[in-house]
Image: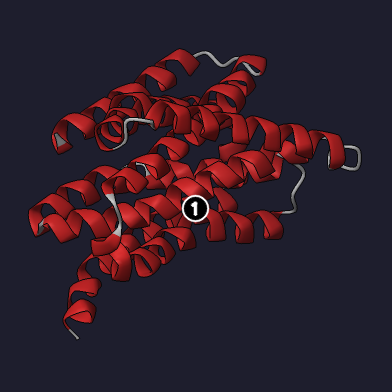
Amino acid sequence: MRMMSGLWIPFSASLLAALVTTIGIYVIRHFEGWGRRNSTYFACFAAGVLISVSFLHIVPKSLGMNEQAPLYLLAGYMFMHLFNRFVTAYVCDKNPEFAIGLVPLLGIGFHSFLDGVVYSITFSVGIFTGILATIGMVLHEFPEGIITYLLLIRGGGSPKQSLVLAFLAAAVSTPLGTLLSYPMISRIEPSLLGALLSVSAGALIYVGATHLLPQAEREPARYSLLALASGILVAAGIIVSNG
């Protein structure tokens, strides 16, 4: 009973994150023309956020929790690379653009699931700590929903299919992560969490540096560098405010 009474606070925070992500998906679904015209800016902004958060926050934190964190970081990156190669070899013969949406979908889904785990951890430490973490993480949920949907659309998915997959990967996975992790949170070894964070960082770096930025370079936009810089500044601001 005590565990259930403590669960509702982090679970509510994860539902808020899922709601903000869903709003992003809804907006881009109903204003797709606007989204397509500005997709390069969203890609650059998201790349700045993902890469910066990984290098400035997730990687240093995981290093403090697991001495082998660099190995798990490399493993996460290489896993995404090999998965991309697999998709390219066995899926892209039928749909050569499918990997553009599928590979980032895996990384974003894993990242969003770990966001739910983070809610469980931070609120277990203290309410104030959990609130600070919630403010920081929720800020990037809106563009994350937009980017996830657009990547699937650009990868050849239908609007309905892209809507469902983006909702499941970017929104539903967060409260699911909270629900599954909270009962076990007191049993999770810091070294195991550090390993998971490192794998997540590797996946996010791959998504940002190997998928989002090259797409932005292929479709140059006037203010793309400004969008990238804005993503970096937002990520840095979140990290500083949560520090």
Mark 1 residue crowding within 10 angstroms, few (<14) / some (14–19) / many (20+)? many
> Relative to residue 144, is residue 84 drawn left or right?
right
Q: Residue furthest right?
A: 93
- Front-most of residues 100 and 30: 100
Residue type pointed to by label 1: Ala
Q: Which residue is mark 1?
A: 170
Residue drawn where x is 21% and y is 77% of the image: 3
Q: Quadrant of residue 57?
A: top left
- Give the image location of residue 50, x and y in percent: 42, 31
- Give the image location of residue 76, x and y in percent: 52, 35
Residue 71 appears in view: yes
Residue drawn where x is 27% and y is 47% of the image: 190
User: In this rendering, is residue 41 above or below 2?
Assistant: above
Quadrant (top left/top right/bottom left/bottom right) for the N terminus: bottom left
Q: Quadrant of residue 225?
A: top left
User: In this rendering, is residue 74 above or below 174?
Assistant: above
Residue 38 appears in view: no
Q: Secondary structure at mark 1?
A: helix
What colouring method underlies this structural image?
A: secondary structure
- Give the image location of residue 81, x and y in percent: 65, 30
Residue drawn where x is 68% and y is 44% of the image: 102
